[in-house]
Image (cartoon, rainbow, N blue to C red):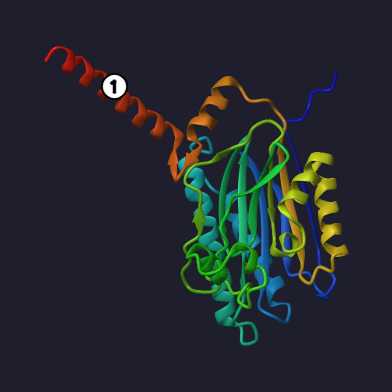
Amino acid sequence: MQRQKAFETGVATDPGQVRASNEDFGLVRELPEGVLLLVADGMGGHDGGRVASGMAADAIIHELEFAEIQWNDPHQVRSLLEQSLLRANTEVYRAAQASRGNRHLGTTVMAVIMQGCNAHIAHAGDSRAYLVRSGRAFRLTADHSRVQDLVSAGEVSPKDARMHPDVHLLTRAVGAAATLEPDVRRTPLKLAQSDVLVVCSDGLYEKVSGQEIAKAFRLFPPQAACERLVGLANRRGAGDNITVAAYRWNLPESFADRTVRHLTREYGGIPVWTWALAGSLVCLAGVLLGVAALHW
């Protein structure tokens, strides 16, 4: 009997139906201790976007492949991932300043380091990450965009956001300024059996719904699902480049892993274990007060 692989991956990219060139960059690449999923959506004009996304990807890969860290330490992996985006920002920004024709080089970056079932996630811009679990797609990241700020402030509804005139105006991007504050997840996301981690550019999610993303990965293996999603976006007249990469975790969780995943889930930004501890302390205080009342 053939043993099931621990994970499967897929990646697909396409120029779309309007643009002549593809300024997106997408890859799945093995690291010394893990797998990198990366999507970069470049901007700059005159092929500047293609230069920016490729340059950012090269800088991130170089930083990760030659790093000397303890890969079993999640804090070191998180710091390395953040540092790789900062390195990419420096490279792209310097190239933009040195170029007369491409002073506005920049790119979104969505980067995920998968270590078994643990996902370390970082991004800048409006490329997104989704978790596909139990037939549903859950968005993991918030866009760094003017419209997302308006939605968060309650000034624009999520339904109206897609048609807002500033929908493509970014508030953060790699190479757009001398400094960058990348969004880096504090703790790794733990995948359960058959979960899929999906990263994509706006060319995909503007034409394909979360429900359709989930359905594709329920019906097909990652590579076929990525290709079908790109095809679906194209059939709907994709006006932008389209890129998607995915990682499916296949091994069943141990009891210990499942317990840790449940305890580290967050509600209102606070881990479940914190709520449980607070509840236990409240109950204990109630018991002690009751005992004290009986002896009063």
Quadrant in which residue 151 is drawn:
bottom right
Q: Position of residue 224 (x, y in %)?
A: 85, 46
Front-most of residues 212 and 120 = 212
Front-most of residues 215 and 34 = 215
**Residue 167, visible in the rendered structure:** yes
Quadrant in which residue 148 is drawn:
bottom right
On screen, residue 214 above or below 23:
above
Front-most of residues 207 and 118 = 207
Q: Position of residue 230 (x, y in %)?
A: 82, 58
- Picture residue at 40% right of the left edge, 29% below the top: 276
Q: Position of residue 22 (x, y in %)?
A: 78, 69
What quarter of the picture does the C terminus occupy?
A: top left
Toward the left, the furthest residue is 296
On screen, residue 81 above or below 166:
above
Instruction: Name the side, left or right, on which 121 lies relative to 228.
Output: left
On screen, residue 266 above or below 144:
above
Front-most of residues 55 and 143 = 143
- Picture residue at 82% right of the left edge, 47% below the top: 225
Q: Position of residue 251 (x, y in %)?
A: 70, 27
Mark 1: which secondary structure? helix
Q: Callout 1: 10 Å neighbours few (<14), some, many (20+)? A: few
What quarter of the picture does the N terminus occupy?
A: top right
Quadrant in which residue 170 is drawn:
bottom right
On screen, residue 1 above or below 108:
above
Which residue is under mark 1? 284
- Picture residue at 62% right of the left edge, 68% below the top: 161
Mark 1 residue type? Leu
